[in-house]
């Protein structure tokens, strides 16, 4: 993050951290998980987000798009 009030930098950081917050953390209770279980679940989510989710511009996942 850069200086206070620098919108472009703040928007990029908020967008980066906002996706996992909405998709992974929102409406889920992680209180009964150990730190290792939480980290494994977060890693699984990030791999799914990167490789498996359907991208509207491709109509398929990024992994399948790259394979084709």
Image (tube, rainbow, N blue to C red):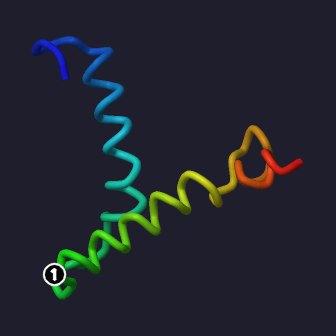
From the viewer's perspective, is residue 24 above or below residue 50?
below
From the viewer's perspective, is residue 36 above or below residue 19?
below
Please state the horizontal and vertical placement of residue 12, each as a whole percent of the image. Answer: 35, 27
Using the rendered view, name the quadrant where residue 5 is placed.
Answer: top left
Give the residue drawn at x 37%, y 56%.
22
Using the rendered view, name the quadrant where residue 58 is placed.
Answer: top right
Q: Which residue is mark 1?
A: 31
Give the residue drawn at x 79%, y 54%.
64
From the viewer's perspective, is residue 40 above or below residue 43?
below
Element under disc 1: loop
Using the rendered view, name the quadrant where residue 31 is placed.
Answer: bottom left
Quarter holding the N terminus? top left
Give the residue drawn at x 32%, y 15%.
8
Please state the horizontal and vertical placement of residue 3, each as a whole percent of the image. Answer: 12, 12
Give the residue drawn at x 32%, y 25%.
11
Residue sitting nearer the eye, 39 or 5: 39
């Amino acid at each position: 993050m850069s200086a206070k009030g620098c919108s472009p930098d703040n928007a990029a950081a908020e967008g980066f951290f906002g996706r996992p917050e909405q998709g992974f953390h929102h409406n889920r209770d992680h209180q009964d998980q150990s730190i290792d279980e939480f980290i494994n679940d977060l890693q699984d989510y990030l791999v799914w987000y990167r490789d498996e989710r359907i991208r509207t511009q491709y109509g398929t996942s990024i992994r399948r798009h790259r394979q084709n």
